[in-house]
Image (cartoon, rainbow, N blue to C red):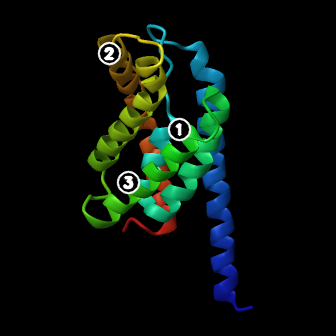
């Protein structure tokens, strides 16, 4: 093995560990801290924000893989039907990464807008059964979805530093 291939493998291993640390930290905050800090009965959802950030700053491949892992953790922590968030966050990571690879810039504005879109999709997915199977009025569900999305968007600011740093480390941002 050459020095160059060893360095490449080392960089990949370090990147993998850093991504896993980010994922576990965000998961711990979402599952162990935020349930004790509800705002008007709402708890923020930050795993989708992390997925959008990784996808914006590293592209569709990293976004899809990170979305898969985050979706599995989201399904576990939210007691949703198995695979629901896994599918939604995987495809969201791929879609956001594809948009960033082609038409969007790798800036905070793109990260914020993509986070808002992914959070809105996740809110709809969470509220879908209440709308169609429980008969809850749509205006109540939309109000809840909007408030949860806005509360979750507050965390784009602290997460931006970490996802952008991982993008810089991966060499995606110049």
Which residue, given by chain and number where applicable, does mark 3 sit on?
96
| SS for dot 3 | helix
Q: x, y (%) of residue 18? A: 63, 54
Which residue, given by chain and number where applicable, does mark 1 sit on?
47
Of circles 2 and 3, the one toward us is 2
Residue at 64% across, 87% down: 4
Q: Residue furthest right?
A: 1
Is the residue 11 above or below the residue 121 in the image?
below
Question: Going from the N terminus, do you reach mark 2 or mark 3 first?
Answer: 3
In this rendered view, identify the residue nearer to me: 40 or 95: 95
Could you classify mark 3 by the number of other residues whose Cα lies within 10 Å: few (under 14), some (14-19), or many (20 or more)? Answer: many
Could you classify mark 2 by the number of other residues whose Cα lies within 10 Å: few (under 14), some (14-19), or many (20 or more)? Answer: few
Query: From this viewpoint, is residue 131 visible?
Result: yes
| SS for dot 1 | helix
Q: x, y (%) of residue 15? A: 61, 62
Question: Going from the N terminus, do you reach mark 3 or mark 1 first?
Answer: 1
Which residue, given by chain and number where applicable, does mark 2 sit on?
138
Name the quadrant of the N terminus.
bottom right
In this rendered view, identify the residue nearer to me: 85 or 77: 85
Residue at 69% across, 66% down: 13
Residue at 39% across, 55% down: 95
Question: Going from the N terminus, do you reach mark 2 or mark 1 first?
Answer: 1
Is the residue 129 above or below the residue 46 in the image?
above
Query: From this viewpoint, is residue 22 visible?
Result: no
**Distance between the alpha carbons at the discs numbered 2 and 3:** 28 Å
| SS for dot 2 | helix
């Amino acid at each position: 093995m050459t020095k160059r291939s060893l360095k490449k493998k080392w960089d990949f291993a370090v990147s993998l560990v850093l991504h896993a640390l980010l994922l576990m930290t965000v998961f711990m905050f979402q599952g162990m801290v935020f349930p004790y800090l509800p705002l008007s009965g709402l708890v923020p959802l930050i795993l989708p924000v992390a997925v959008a950030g990784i996808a914006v700053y590293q592209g569709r491949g990293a976004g899809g893989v990170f979305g898969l892992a985050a979706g599995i953790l989201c399904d576990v922590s939210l007691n949703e039907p198995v695979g629901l968030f896994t599918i939604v966050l995987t495809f969201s990571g791929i879609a956001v990464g594809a948009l960033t690879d082609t038409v969007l810039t790798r800036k905070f504005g793109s990260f914020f807008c993509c986070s808002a879109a992914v959070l809105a999709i996740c809110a709809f997915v969470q509220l879908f059964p209440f709308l169609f199977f429980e008969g809850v009025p749509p205006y109540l569900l939309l109000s809840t979805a909007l408030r949860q999305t806005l509360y979750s968007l507050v965390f784009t600011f602290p997460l931006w530093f970490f996802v952008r740093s991982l993008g810089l480390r991966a060499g995606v941002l110049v």
